[in-house]
Amino acid sequence: MALSVGILARYMARIYALARKSTLALRPRKRALLQRLARPPIAAIRASVVERFGTCGKAACSCHSGDKHGPYYYLIQCVAKGHVRKFQLKEPEQQQRAREAVACFNEFYDTLEELSQINAELLRRADPIDSAGRTT
């Protein structure tokens, strides 16, 4: 089973090199991120598109000797601890829409993660984090 890229990315966030940037450089970046987050994507899905190949129950089928059936594409979404929602994406258009929706969510999440790291860095510097450059 080949998993899509991005599953591990949700567990391991990208680390932004913020400690070396000045507060004056972080503030405009924070404003730009907030503007992007103000327009969340409508068609975002927090999930993974997975490609699978499988074997059937026929003993004489060539899938048992390496030529597996597939690819079959699935949208897999962990909705709660121990609860997974999964369904097959049968049509190429459906597969493409799912990939785009997952990419939209990942981009939105990455933007939120960068904002979070900037806020943590500003907090470490004892600067206000509740404004994008304005004094509180």
Image (cartoon, rainbow, N blue to C red):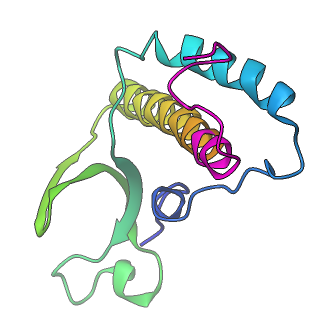
**Residue positioned 48% across, 68% down in the render:** 2
Quadrant the N terminus occupies: bottom left
| Magenta segment boundaries in residue numbering | 119-136
Left or right position of 124 against 86 = right
- In this rendered view, identify the residue nearer to me: 28 or 130: 130
Indicate the position of residue 59 as horizontal and vertical percent values: 21, 90
**Residue positioned 57% across, 57% down in the render:** 13
- Is residue 35 placed above or below 104 in the rendered structure? above
Magenta portion: prevailing SS class:
loop
Left or right position of 121 against 58 = right
Determine if the magenta segment contains residue 64: no
Residue 45 in which image quadrant: top left
- Is residue 50 placed above or below 117 in the rendered structure? below
Indicate the position of residue 76 as horizontal and vertical percent values: 27, 53
Indicate the position of residue 57 as horizontal and vertical percent values: 15, 81
Residue 107 in which image quadrant: top right
How many labels sit on residues? Answer: 0
- In this rendered view, identify the residue nearer to me: 93 or 66: 93
Left or right position of 57 against 22 = left
Residue 42 in which image quadrant: top left
**Residue positioned 49% across, 57% down in the render:** 4
From this viewpoint, which residue is outermost toward the left? 83
